[in-house]
Amino acid sequence: MQQKNVNYTLDFVIPSGQDGATGPQGVQGEMGPTGPASLETLLYTDFFDSSKEGYLDIFKNTILPNNATVFTPKTNQIEINEPGNYEFIVSGSMEGLTANEVLSIWYDSHQ
């Protein structure tokens, strides 16, 4: 009796052996594309609490990286030392506000 085109299923397990030695380091590939930009400098300030109208005095500040010269915090202002585009985020708690209250970030291009 002859059989042709017969399918057989083999069911067995080959045990894994120990890992071999690590091979040599390969050559370095080409440089890829530049990734997205990140913030170059960050200034974080805490202000003293106040219940009066006017400027808020800076309590403490943190500049990252700490050797950056983009910002110079002063008593109640932040001096920007380099031209560019800047993002300002203001957060805090303000109590007793009535309609039409204004929070100002003042910019003087003539200093």
Image: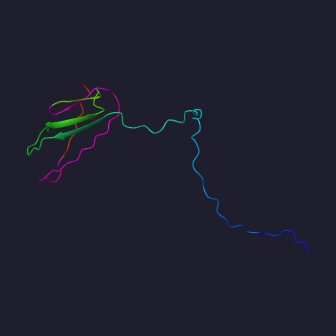
> In this orientation, which residue lies closer to the viewer: 98 or 50?
50
Residue at image x 20%, y 44%? 103
> In this orientation, which residue lies closer to the viewer: 30 or 26?
26
> In this orientation, which residue lies closer to the viewer: 91 or 4?
4
Left or right: residue 38 versus residue 77 is: right
Furthest toward the bottom, the residue is 1
Is residue 82 one of those drawn in magenta?
yes
Quarter holding the N terminus?
A: bottom right
Quarter holding the C terminus?
A: top left
Q: Is residue 9 above or below residue 32?
A: below
**Magenta part, dominant SS:** loop
Residue at image x 27%, y 31%? 66
Magenta span covers which residues? 75-101
> In this orientation, which residue lies closer to the viewer: 6 or 49?
6
Residue 72 percent coordinates (x, y)? 23, 28
Left or right: residue 4 versus residue 80 is: right
Residue at image x 23%, y 36%? 62
Colouring rule applied to residues: rainbow
**Number of residue marks:** 0
Is residue 76 one of those drawn in magenta?
yes
Left or right: residue 4 versus residue 89 is: right
Left or right: residue 28 versus residue 38 is: right
Residue 60 percent coordinates (x, y)? 17, 37
Furthest toward the left, the residue is 52
Residue 81 percent coordinates (x, y)? 28, 26
Residue 3 percent coordinates (x, y)? 88, 71
Q: Is residue 81 above or below residue 52?
A: above
Furthest toward the top, the residue is 111
